[in-house]
Image: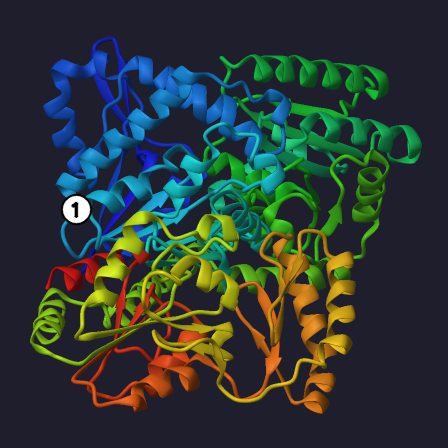
Amino acid sequence: MKRLLIVSNRLPVTVTKREGKIRYTQSVGGLATGLSSLLRSYENMWIGWPGIAYERVKDQKPRIKRTLMQYNCHPVFLNQYDIEQFYYGFCNRIIWPLFHYFSQYATYNKNNWDSYQRVNQIFCNRIKHIAKADDIIWIHDYHLLLLPQLLRKELPNASIGFFLHIPFPSSEVFRTLPSRKEIVRGMLGADLVGFHTYDYAHHYLQTVRRLLGYEHSKAQVNFDNRIVRVDAFPMGIDYDQFHRAAEDEGIQKEVRKIKKRVGERKIIVSIDRLDYTKGIAQRLEAFDYFLETNPKYREKVTLILVAVPSRTGVEQYALLKREVDELISRINGKYGTIGWIPIWYLYRFLPFKNLVPLYLAGDVALITPIRDGMNLIAKEYLATKKYKKGVLILSEMAGASKILGEAIIVNPNDKEEIAGAIKNALRMPEHEQMRRNDVMQRRLKRYNVERWAHDFLDNLSRIKLKQQELTAKNLRAEVRKKILREYSESRNRLLLLDYDGTLVSFTGEPAKAIPDREIVKVLRTLADNSRNELVIVSGRDRATLDKWFGNVGCGLIAEHGVWFKNKKYAWAMIKPLKNDWKEQIQPILELYVDRTPGTSIEEKDYSIVWHYRKTDQRLGELRASELKERLLDLASALNLSILEGSKVIEVKNKGINKGIAAQKWIDSKTWDFIIAIGDDWTDEDTFEVVPKKSYSIKVGIGYTKAKYTIPSPQDARNLLKEFAKC
């Protein structure tokens, strides 16, 4: 059985020290609670910080470690400085506010960042000594955003998943973070990157493209010659645990106590951590507005507000506590009577046995965060409703709103809308409550926390299999030796080489693709060898190829096969072509350049290319689809081909490609060694026409007709350097 290593900032068991005694208690938090049921299904180990500074327990470290191992927990000890700088600093003063769109609260500090990097490296060092070859490593949340890539460097073949439990912001917000590129790369070290909603996944993919330049296809990114999948997995709850609790006599007794104290009034429950992202102050303002505009509901409804203390040492939280206290006092003083207090306020953590009775007693749950990754409280409230009575009012900014669409969905900043939702909830007929809740409960029961975890891990397994399939063609050392041996022994060799993306990294910017001295020297050495026929097979125009390689002494193929030139003769066309069709096509492409900022037209002798690499990805893809559809009818009438490549749409004459041009060289004489190297869809035609006994190599991973693949242009250059030495 494969072992599952769960890695998070905190262990599910917290270590405390009081009066010299070490105590172990269950940790508070959605992740520890959510995964508790999963752990019964796997051989597992949980790796994380035990919740206490190393200085306080350094003499008792071995004993603590032994005790925690009984809970399948491996502690990562942190000193007090790193706890302050890493956890309270970078995590809670930078990442947390920024990812929740409270950028005004984000305070940047180099010491915080240095500590964040150091703690992620400490986790990496621990894990690499614990992990076995076939372990599954599942890393959680924003505290460890650098860890996947650090582990990838140490354990290149490991199965690594990463899940972010908070929102991932839009690229425009994320790019304000000074260490933005390091964090994005850190997450890409995983094989599968998971988020609660598609919106978060989309924001991340957009950020990867805009900051690092890596495109994605079907939510997959080719990073460091490895496919990384990005997807949404809405975290569930232990549905049965909450649903069964409704039958527990002890919990029913607590429900009766609550209702006796409240009387016949309707109960609205609001349960959250005291955090500025939860919208508690805005919620109280809305409740005030509701009572003000609906006086008939005064003394007929009670709001039970539970605020769990959080980050009490952070200034913003202290200010929020004061604001909430003052709002509650003002509302209770404004509307309260001798026998009725509008808001029943509990500033404390409630364990399960006290939390569930509140869910059961609540006629309405008011959950309106300003921004929330998921919000499991909304799901827990619904799960307890055994008789399906109760109304959920939920913020559209909570990830849970994407799953719980039958709830009353509100804008958390609109107090009039929230007040109206409260009124509608209190007036909603029972049969309507039951109808809505039945649909949501069935959904929550199906996709519970165990299903969520298995879904993530199953997808992780599938992406690893896909990686293995794609790397099966990797050019292994023994094949490389065979190629070099056959090259050395052969007398008539044909080398067919693409340029952009094959011998230099493709950027889409011509200035960055100019051949450097090293590659020119290697190509000239190969071309000067009397046993070799070297041919550059490119999509570039004739003038560019002449400028770059005219003095190398090699054959040239331009415009994907329209033109060819060998050592002895001038440029010639593969076959007679016309280009008068450009008069009809060019105005259409110009229109799409005008409508789509960042796009451009490249005109060649017998083709026109519309580039959209520099525009917004979604806009570019939309315009490319529109353009291709618009051109298809014209293309048929004018005998043209419409080719869609890597952020380009190319219009050219039919019946011309790199393979047809390469065939001229292949048929020109008898070769005892042929090798073709390329990187994209246009090179597949070349791979298809080379003889079976030849060698064809694709640069990069992905589907290909080539026999072998190599990771990067540098690997292609290294192979050519070895040829040059023979």
Q: Is residue 665 above or below residue 551?
A: below
Left/right of residue 330 with respect to residue 100 in the rendered view: right
Figure quadrant of the N terminus: bottom left
Q: Position of residue 172 (x, y in %)?
A: 62, 38
Rendering quarter of residue 372: top right
Q: Position of residue 148 (x, y in %)?
A: 32, 43
Q: Residue under circle 1? A: 131
Q: Is residue 576 above or below residue 131?
A: below
Q: At 42% from the left edge and 83% from the top edge, which residue is drawn?
A: 661
Q: At 25% from the left edge and 33% from the top edge, which residue is drawn?
A: 123
Q: Position of residue 432 (x, y in %)?
A: 76, 61
- Secondary element at image label 1: loop
Figure quadrant of the C terminus: bottom left
Left/right of residue 382 with respect to residue 115 in the rendered view: right
Residue 629 shows in this picture? yes
Amino acid under disc 1: Ala
